Image: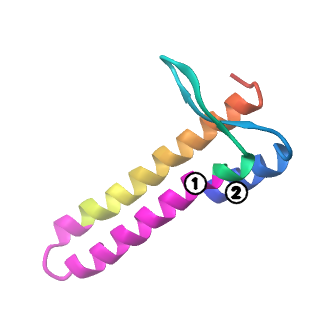
Amino acid sequence: MDWLVAYIMNIRLKGGLTVLHYNVDFGVDLIGEPEKIYILPLLGLVLAVINTVLLGMVYKNDRFTASILLAATIFINIFLFIALAFIYLFNFNLI
């Protein structure tokens, strides 16, 4: 889902600068090309792969730790999706 939102944003923002990060205290603090929007889904994918590899190594010995790793992967990707959603809303003046 993260990749789909990033792809849609990249297509709709072609040719201009986009807000990549917004902070409530300081406002817009990172502006760049729309292609850089793929950093968040890529970060989620890398963390999911790392956690999955760790999960595979730990699962036979400690199922609780494996469950924690799986939950962490899910929560990380949910928060990255929320970050992408707010970037989308801010770039298209919906907030």
On residue 4, which mark appears? 2
Q: Where is 73 relative to 91, above or below?
A: below
| Chosen colour scheme | rainbow
For the residue carrying disc 1, how many other residues have a C-alpha within 10 Å: few (<14), some (14-19), or many (20+)? few
Amino acid on which the number 2 mark rests in the picture: Leu
Q: Where is 2 relative to 69, above or below?
A: above
Please name the residue shown 38% across and 59% down the image.
73
Please name the residue shown 49% across and 58% down the image.
43
Q: Is residue 63 left or right of residue 82?
A: left
CA distance for labels 1 and 2: 13 Å
Q: Where is 2 relative to 33, above or below?
A: below
Please name the residue shown 24% across and 81% down the image.
57
SS at mark 2?
A: helix
Query: For the C terminus, which image quadrant?
Result: top right
Q: Which residues are magenta?
A: 38-66
The residue mark sitting in front, 1 or 2, is 1
Q: Any magenta on residue 41?
A: yes
